[in-house]
Image (cartoon, rainbow, N blue to C red):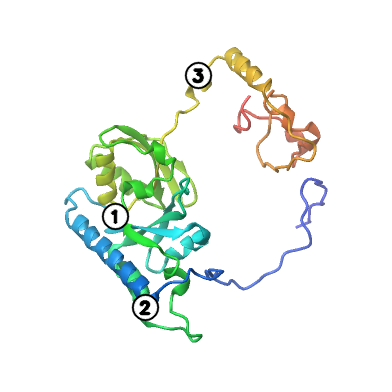
Amino acid sequence: MALLPRNRPHLHVEGGGHNEPYTSPRLSIQGLPPPRARAAHAARLKQAVDQAIEQARVRLAAREKGVAEGTPGFYLQFELPIEHQHAVDSLENKPKAIELVAVQPVAEGHDTISATVFVPERAADFFDKRIEAYRDGETKTGRPKNEALIARIDNVQLGAAQSLFTDDPELFPAAGAPTWWEVWLRDGRLPTFRIVAARLNVATKEHTISFPERDVILALSDLAAMERLIQHSDAVAELRVAKDTPRLFLEMRAVEQADWAANLADRITPPSAVAPAVCLLDSGATQAHPLIAPALNPADQHSYDPAWGVGDSAHWNGTAH
């Protein structure tokens, strides 16, 4: 097959590719962990983990038959110092199916970060064993085993709906208030969530948004019902409050939309000549749109085939008119 000429000035590939053997990435935590009184720190964390697991098993035993679906498990919420937040990825363990699901934004005035993992019941002793090895074992260099992670953990507790809430904390729904939740689901758990939601009479929207490792669905419930849904499934990764949609603008007539766009265009500050540039691969852009024109130079629009043109095509749903 003949090679096509490299005549696209907006696409530049340096050199050619070559094969390399696959290497599994190994997680490495950089920097020194906080200084700890080893025995006391291990004892405190082990007590917290054991208490959380005991509470989790009570909840699991209380799951209603005919309602629960998915792998039995629970959530553990960890607190780490802000300066060691890079260590949250190490809480995950894929061979044990322990998944990091939610990292909450740091609240103003707080010096810790909260991260929550889903733990299958069959792996309930995972963190206990890591803490015990930190307490009793040493590496070849004489350091406590698992120090890079365990010494960075300030506290552990059983997770709940609030542990999975990654929105503005002030938006967390009050008890008893029916709320449209934006529910981010773990990979492949959408059917499980729908089944449990139906069994608990939790209304859900039919439409979902899918990402490589998450599905997002809207669900209407109060806090107690959402807690039950979490208790009876392994599906939920994150929770947020559903925000207003642009339905008002989408249902406007074109002339009304134009008025709103013109009003906003008068308040836009165009980017400077040295502002960072973004390469957007799309099916076309309506450069003449008053909200796009200040930031898109017609000379920067290209298409692989000149016959396609560079404007928006209603058929391919590019930039909205």
Q: What residue is at 76 percent from the left and 56 percent from the top?
A: 13
Going from the N terminus, do you reach mark 1 or mark 2 first? Answer: 1
Name the foreground residue: 2 vs 209. 209
Amino acid at pointer 2: Arg
Alpha carbons under labels 2 and 3: distance apart: 63 Å
Specify few, some or many for label 2: CA neighbours under 10 Å numbering under 14, 14-19, or 20 or more. Answer: many
Sort mark 3 into few (<14), some (14-19) or many (20+) by Cα contacts within 10 Å.
Answer: few
Q: Is residue 188 visible?
A: yes
Determine which of the numbered discs, if any, sits on residue 70 in the image.
1
Q: Which badge, 2 or 3, comes first in the chain's sequence?
A: 2
Disc 2 secondary structure class: helix
Q: Nearer the viewer, residue 29 or 97?
A: 29
Which of the two residues, 67 or 2, is positioned nearer the viewer here?
A: 67
Which is more foreground, mark 1 or mark 2? 2
Q: Position of residue 115 (x, y in %)?
A: 42, 56
Q: CA distance from mark 1 to mark 3?
A: 40 Å
Q: Amino acid at mark 1?
A: Gly
x then y, percent, for residue 60: 21, 57
**Spatial distance from mark 1 to mark 2, Cα to Cα?**
34 Å
- The mark that comes first in sequence, 1 or 3, is 1
Task: For the N terminus, give its image quadrant.
Answer: bottom right
Residue located beneath label 2 in the image? 135
Relative to 59, 74 lies left or right: right
Q: Could one spot residue 92 in this view of the protein? A: no
Residue 65: horizontal and vertical position, in percent? 16, 51
Look at mark 3 in the image and give the residue it sits on. 251
